[in-house]
Amino acid sequence: MRKLLLKSFLMVVIFWWIVAFLVFSLADPSTNLAVLERLQSLAPFLTLSLPRQASALDALHLQFLALKYWTLPVLGLSALVAGMGVGLAVLYTRFRIQQRHLREQPANRYWRDLGITLGELPIPPVLPSEETVLSGLPAEETNAPAPDESPATLNRLQALPAVHRELIDQIIGVLAAHPEAYVGPGHKTSLLEHSLNVLEVSLSRKESETEPLLPVAAIAHDLGKITAFEKQEDGSFKRVRWHDKESARILATLDGWWKLPEIERKSLLLALRYDHSSGNIPFLGKGVRERTLSLQNLLETSDRVATAEEKKVVLADLPLPDMVFEAFLKALPTFPLHVAGFAPAKNVKAAGWKKGDVLYLLENQCRERVLQVMDPDINAALGGLYRAQNTIAPFSQALFQALESRALLIREYNGQVVKAEEPMWNILSGTKEFKSVIMIRITEAMRLKLPETDTTYDITVTGSLRSSPPGEMAVASLDMAGLLRKPKKPRPPVETPPTEEGEAVAFKGGYKVKPADALGVPVTEAIEASAFVATPPRTEPSSEPAVATDPVEPFDVVQTQLPSIEEPGVQDAGPALETAAAGSNTGPVSKKKRVLKKPPARSVK
């Protein structure tokens, strides 16, 4: 725009100069002579030889003198003034541009080719880092510890693409620069060592050969704990942010993450950002969400395996059974038991029963309450409330050892013996069955911590935990564990009516009918619960002579829906059948039929 305006201005000036030149050239010579005389009077130092009178012969000479002493000097002066003006404008423009650059020069205005001219650009803080080359060189040439001593795992690490190895080095550098970062309860290692252990497990998995993001996610999954937990004055840590969100934020500040392909960059960031809330993963393109979920599943398994190995080391040198037993005695007064006059809060689950010298405790309720009074690190090392399916929790194993060593664990009752590794029973409290019950002998020290009165329910031991048929629940679920309900009244035993020939007999599988000897008719037995066989009514012998009739055919079997065997008083006799022999003395069988009358048709006028 500026160039077009300047060009137009110069063209206008030159045009009018040309017009003025032509006007002076074609003007009367006396006019040029008057101009030159006026110029000589203004500039006496000019020596001009002017004629007395202007004639046509002197017109060209006068025009040359006007061009030499007037036009060219004025033109030069104008160019000089214009040049000075342009120079001043250029200097002023450069000054303003320099001032603008000075305003934009301070920090927080540019980040990764993104900048603003007003205000400050919010830039995520970049954490300090130490230079490491763990994944790029052999283990003997690096100063940092190798993730695994096995050559196969190290070869898998070095076989990763260059961009992934570079990002792993940057993440390890950030972790190495924060040795005091929070790791979590139940860990005695640093955050760097824990991350390297997870990296080792992930590299040992076969999936790492096809998913190069798995080792990267393994080393970066707890990166956010550096800023998510702040250390207090007493040495404890306080959570101020969510560490999975912080892990994604810190990852985005590393140069190696920006060098990944777009789909890998998104999948890795989402896997860390929504590590504990995978249901909130947004849709960021085709295939991103599927790869993110797959990466999270692989990462969760690797982290669980590495954490379990670390917690075994924590518990290895501790007298765990004694510590668990002390915590058990400490938490014993807080156990809600089924006792007379005890009115717990609504929806409070009972932990067990006290009956004589035996204490019956539900395993899951006992584990939950004892772990609350234990050291948080020991609690986490024992796995907390988590228990793998069809396994005994580490806490329960330690409690069984402590009770067994003190001869307090009841493993034999009425000739039944439970396994040493699974010493739990199934009991009946009133009419309700409970599984995974620990039977403990009550000592004098324990009696002081328990209620004085016993439970009013009748406790019946039905067998060991695994004595139930396969497929049933082996551990009591929370909704079945000790709900405070009044025991139901036992049902009276089912009385079986006396049977005669041709009458129905109740049994567990359904009903069956004995054949009637009087008629000699073979009758098929019903073996299903819904089968019923109807028989003809019994008849008295007649004094009249017998009349020859056709052979009697067997009666048909009528299938009808019967009530449950648990409600024998509501039995249906079933429909009556007609006799098959014509002219017999048994008499007709009355049958009531319900006739549905068709309503009369209504005429419409």
Image (spheres, rainbow, N blue to C red):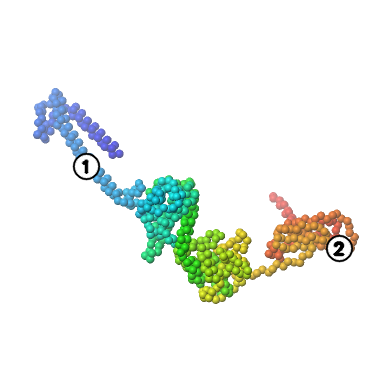
Q: Which residue is mark 2?
A: 541
What's the amino acid at mark 1? Leu
Q: Residue 542's x, y, as percent?
A: 87, 62
In the structure shown, which secondary structural element does the residue marked by tag 2 occupy? loop
Residue 21 lies, with reference to residue 86, above or below; the image says above
Q: Which residue is mark 1?
A: 88
| Residue in the foreground of this view, choosing between 88 and 553 | 553
Residue at left 79%, top 56%? 555
Q: Residue 73's x, y, as percent?
A: 16, 34
Labels 1 & 2 near each other (Cβ < 8 A): no
Q: Judge left or right: residue 242 versus residue 427.
A: left
Looking at the image, can residue 241 be seen?
A: no
Q: Judge left or right: residue 534 versus residue 263.
A: right
Of pointers 1 and 2, the one earlier in the residue sequence? 1
Quadrant of the drawing holding the N terminus: top left
| Residue in the foreground of this view, choosing between 160 and 287 | 160
Q: Residue 369's x, y, as percent?
A: 50, 67
Residue at left 22%, top 42%? 88
In the structure shown, which secondary structural element does the residue marked by tag 1 occupy? helix
Residue at left 62%, top 63%? 467
Q: Quadrant of residue 469?
A: bottom right
Residue lying farthest top? 57
Q: How far separated are the C-alphas under marks 1 and 2?
A: 145 Å
